[in-house]
Amino acid sequence: MSKRMQNNLEKFSDVVILDATHKSNRFGMPLMDLIIINNFGQTITCFLALLENQKYESFYWALSQLKSQLKNKIGVIISDDEEALCKGK
């Protein structure tokens, strides 16, 4: 996370949207991204992680990295019904 990403997440951490793409990049790896919506209605990316796979351990690692960067708690996380991601939260 860049400093700008951290600042945005601190200001707008009430509701975040978390999703992982399925091998849609040139590395063939899942990309997990976390976005927020600011008070102007704009979506802003606040966290990115290239994952080895879409299993529980990978999501757990990524979410642990995110948690170590946070100063505030996230209020609500919205995601799809990815079983390993839900388990990793």
Image: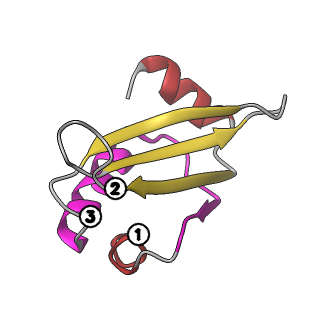
Task: Tell whether 43 sits left or right of 35.
Answer: right
Q: Name the residue under label 2.
A: 63
- Inter-mark Cα distance, 2 to 1: 7 Å
Q: Nearer the viewer, residue 75 or 36?
A: 36
Q: Image height check: is 18 above or below 80?
A: above
For mark 1, give the secondary structure. loop
Q: What residue type is labelled 1?
A: Lys
Q: Are marks 2 and 1 in contact (CB under 8 Å)?
A: yes
Q: Does the magenta stretch include residue 31?
A: no
Q: Name the residue under label 1.
A: 89
Q: Does the magenta stretch include residue 66?
A: yes
Q: Image height check: is 48 above or below 8?
A: below
Tell me the quadrant of the picture where the N terminus can be found.
top left
The x and y percentages for residue 78 are 61, 63
Q: Going 37% across and 38% down the picture, which residue do you hit? A: 48
Q: Magenta residues, as a range?
A: 56-80
Q: Mark 3 points at which residue?
A: 60
Q: How crowded is mark 1: few (under 14 residues within 10 Å), some or many (20 or more)?
A: few
Q: Nearer the viewer, residue 15 or 70?
A: 15
The x and y percentages for residue 38 are 75, 33
Q: Which amino acid does label 3 sit on?
A: Tyr
Q: What residue type is labelled 2?
A: Leu
Task: Tell whether 75 sits left or right of 30.
Answer: right
Q: Going 33% across and 46% down the picture, which residue do you hit? A: 24
For mark 2, give the secondary structure. helix
- Inter-mark Cα distance, 3 to 1: 7 Å
Q: Do the residues labelled 3 and 2 touch (CB within 8 Å)?
A: yes
